[in-house]
Amino acid sequence: MGADISVPIDASGGHHGICENDREGETMATLKDVAREAGLTVGTVSRVLNNRGYISEQTREKVYDVMKRLNYQPNEMARSLSKQTSNTIGVIVPHIVHPFFSKVISNLEQAAYSSQYRILLFNSKEKEEKEEEYIEACRSNRVAGVILCSGSFNTAKFKNLGFPLITIERFLDEGTAGIECDNYSGGVQAAEHLIERGCRHLLHIGGVNELPMPADSRKAAFDEVCRRHGVEHHAVDPGQVFYDDMNYYPVIRSALEQYPETDGIFASSDVIAAQAIRVCHEKNIEVPGQMKIVGFDDVNIASLTYPAITTVRQPVKEMAEAAVSAVVRSAAGEMVPARSVFPVSLVIREST
Amino acid sequence: MGADISVPIDASGGHHGICENDREGETMATLKDVAREAGLTVGTVSRVLNNRGYISEQTREKVYDVMKRLNYQPNEMARSLSKQTSNTIGVIVPHIVHPFFSKVISNLEQAAYSSQYRILLFNSKEKEEKEEEYIEACRSNRVAGVILCSGSFNTAKFKNLGFPLITIERFLDEGTAGIECDNYSGGVQAAEHLIERGCRHLLHIGGVNELPMPADSRKAAFDEVCRRHGVEHHAVDPGQVFYDDMNYYPVIRSALEQYPETDGIFASSDVIAAQAIRVCHEKNIEVPGQMKIVGFDDVNIASLTYPAITTVRQPVKEMAEAAVSAVVRSAAGEMVPARSVFPVSLVIREST
């Protein structure tokens, strides 16, 4: 808590806090101006704006006319304060530039827009203290709720926040609702596709975190399918996920040196799959002739590489809509499912 | 203006608006609670928080101790309202998923964080009415300023907004400050590099908008350099830019059919360059052997394709810092440069 904090001094009573300031030196019209100009009381103008109580059509029209004429701007901040909550949703992602998260953000913004909410965006960069700081910033900004994407920290601290906390692809015992894709089914589809295309020495390249993540099921499913089909399989993980860096080359290279017989790779993201394709080019391994590769996510990179990547598609649009809807509905006191798992589908392109 | 608008009813006078509400049913500590617990007046506690007037070290420590003990959260919304401006910056981009814009957003978030600002994010999807609506939303949320990225609309409407309007890679006569990269120099570097590597039949694939854009200089520079070197050159443009779709394949294919002697391409983005590489693979044109390709931006895709893309690097981090700094400084009444042009550099990879 720094010395630069500026807090309004006095406290005015009343449950519905009072927040219209005199705006010295500003030309912006106030509610008072609208009332004066319309020859009505502030209370009547407020009832029109809030659509509360009986108001004649004539009065309503007069108020709207004056508001238009005076270019009256309702102050969202003031409205938020009186409601003790705002029309913003905090969105915390580990890395904005990672194509999966930029796709998530884009779809969250669209879903929020449709529900007349705004997005306050935070980039935690996989730093636990930044994540905590951002949760505090969200609380201080009176967000309607927070959507927390992935990340890998202990979540016991997210208790009694006073607003709904929705997770996307992350376990959160203290959260209001979790949105996931069917990671297990994705792993099954990827492994079965590779085996069906003739692969007999499979490799899984994962994104592993220190804590259990929904995405872990991708590998569990892959292992299970390989065992069932009696197919040799190995798994490597980059140790720690650096979404920002997105540098998986050393892990991929050493895995292909350790398991040179590999003829199929299931990468747990399209970014990893794209890098696996580059490593194959380096090593003169023909894709898909000698090596078949399946990614995960279906982000833009999947169709920009050569060969384009066969991948497990997460329904990001639907997941984002569900997350925003969970914020809106649970903020309104409605019950929302604690966990929603969305189906995935295999998009077959050139890499298999 | 809809009927669902809720505006606080009364108006309390006083220049420094009064915005601490009684929070019935909430356990959150108020400024009053802190004052009571510390045995001080609300005015004294406020002076400590605002670092205003003489306060003894002992009093200061006592206040901070109590705030910590009571878990006092200063209410950013209330503070914003009393200041008539908030600690948020509105950011409007045409498309979040386009890798250039996700890189811009990520760097803006980082720069804002360093200046203790938050990002309110809007995706205009190249729709003029959405852009106008978002500017209104920013005004209504009392943002400290707006950063507007690219987009292609007439900007005469953005007059007298009451907050600084900063543009990145977009002309805006009514704006406070424009941040650009040195597009002309980028075009020169790209063309000279291709010619130096032996290309004699050059093609420029642009992203063209209806209105003049700073990026247009890339093509102007390319034309100029080709003319000076007596190198044959053509230019095609996708007609309208669909950042979201990012589908330039038809334009690239037909350009290579129209100009089959082409041996070098300057693409005005890495996304276009990545697609040009895919079209060359399709047509069995070896890159860089038979065709050399230079992109623009230096986003993550540039190093994920095979071959990796030689590109003109925009210093996005520095540009984002300048944009945030322009908001902060001009909101504080300081003068900022009307136009800032940042140097670009050629990053040589495998595609040339």
Image: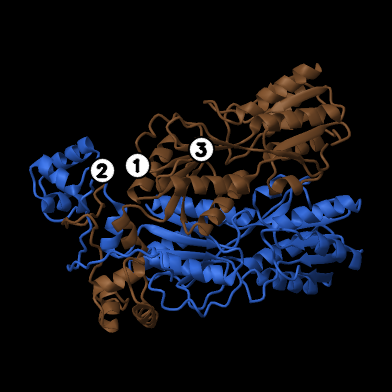
Chain colours: A brown, B blue
Judge depth for marks 2 and 3 and give the one in front: 3
Chain of the residue on which disc 3 is drawn: A
Q: Which residue is mark 3?
A: A337
- Residue A66 occupies quadrant: bottom left
Which amino acid type is shown beneath numbered disc 2?
Answer: Glu
Q: Which residue is mark 1?
A: A162
Q: Which mark is residue A332?
A: none
Closer to the chain start, of discs 3 and 1, is 1
Residue closest to the eye, A76 or B186: A76
Q: Is residue A299 left or right of residue B282?
A: left
Q: Is residue A236 left or right of residue A112?
A: right
Query: Where does the image place residue A27, in percent across and percent down from the top left?
Result: 31, 79
At numbered mark 2, what does the secondary structure look like: helix, strand or loop?
loop
Judge depth for marks 3 and 1 and give the one in front: 3
Decide: marks 2, 1 in contact (CB < 8 A)? yes
The CA span between labels 3 and 1 is: 18 Å
Which amino acid type is shown beneath numbered disc 1?
Answer: Gly
